[in-house]
Amino acid sequence: MTYSPDFTDIVYEVDGTTAVITMNRPARYNAFRAKTVEELTRAFRAAWADHDVRAIILTGAGDKAFCTGGDVKQRAETGDYGPSDSGMFEIGYLHKLIRDVPKPVIAAVNGLAIGGGHVLHVLCDVTIAADTARFGQSGPKVGSFDAGFGSAYLARVVGEKKAREIWFWCRQYSAQEALDMGLVNVIVPAAELMDTARAWAAEVADKSPTAIRVLKHSFNADTDHHAGLSNMAMSALDLFAVSDEGMEGARAFAEKRPPEFAKYYQAH
């Protein structure tokens, strides 16, 4: 097993034919900042370039959260998602990379998959959920949204009605509810999550890599136009996030109080 030592927000390891990418900010429920996204991008690209890697597992550190999306506390503190080497917050690029990497990506959801973290697992090729996992969206509660892959592609996965329920009402769903709606592939006891994910990764490693690559691109072809929606949505989100309404959601979250959105209804 080999590890990459030069990451701070994630852990990257390669074990035989499997790359494991672990979001490693448990104190913030593995919420991502710009640096986290940058490191995730580097890790996925490293797994893509490694000819020995046949499958990739994405998971979160600890037993409480897979990922709870963008670091809203960071946003409340600085008005953005913090510095990165590129100077950009490239979450849209990460979304496309998860889809484009020509190897199966397995989400091993060990706890909360909320907001942008929920989007990450949806974009993975399959999802294995611990029986303690919970799923849901939070954008409209904290002054954010994903009107690209996070909503349009989600509707392909669970259907239009359910996707709108998930986004408009921001409820949380148990692992069993997620399985029932087709949001996850299988549920396992929490203690067996990573062993199961590694077993799935080892099983697919025996298959033809060219067949897997072409099949993945074929599945994606039907929804690749959502990349255009994603670009537009991210541009809109950049503007919305720094607006009074967007910052009210972030401030309310950081201050642990209900957001006061009522005054913004008159503008719509």
Image (cartoon, rainbow, N blue to C red):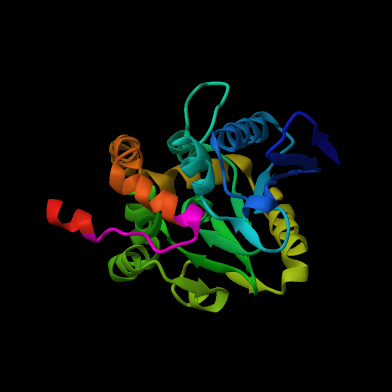
Task: Depth check: give the residue in front, 187 or 190.
Answer: 190
**10 versus 251 height, above or below:** above
Going 47% across and 32% down the picture, which residue do you hit? 90
Vertical relation: 195 (above or below) 204? below
x%, y% of residue 51?
Answer: 70, 32
Q: Residue furthest right?
A: 1
Magenta stretch, residue numbers: 253-262
| Residue sitting farthest toward the top | 86
Name which residue lies at 56% across and 69% down. 134
Write the residue at 55% across / 78% down: 176
Q: Is residue 108 left or right of residue 237?
A: right
Q: Count the marks: how many?
A: 0
| Magenta stretch: includes residue 256 | yes
Q: Does the magenta run of residues contain 49?
A: no
From the top left corner, tell me how far across and down residue 186 is, in percent.
60, 70
Depth check, front residue: 73 or 145: 73
Q: Is residue 32 above or below residue 68?
A: above
Q: Main secondary structure of the magenta part?
A: loop
User: Would you say residue 3 is visible in this rendering?
Assistant: yes
Query: On the picture, is 239 further left or further right than 214?
Result: left
Quadrant where the N terminus lies? top right
Q: Is residue 5 left or right of residue 189?
A: right
- What x and y, as percent, mark residue 32? 57, 44
Q: Can residue 143 be seen from the camera position used here? A: no
Horizontal and vertical percent for residue 112? 58, 63
Q: Residue at x 73, y 39 (%)?
A: 12
Q: Is residue 240 left or right of residue 62?
A: left
**250 and 190: which one is in front?**
250
Q: Looking at the rendering, which quadrant does residue 68 occupy? A: bottom right
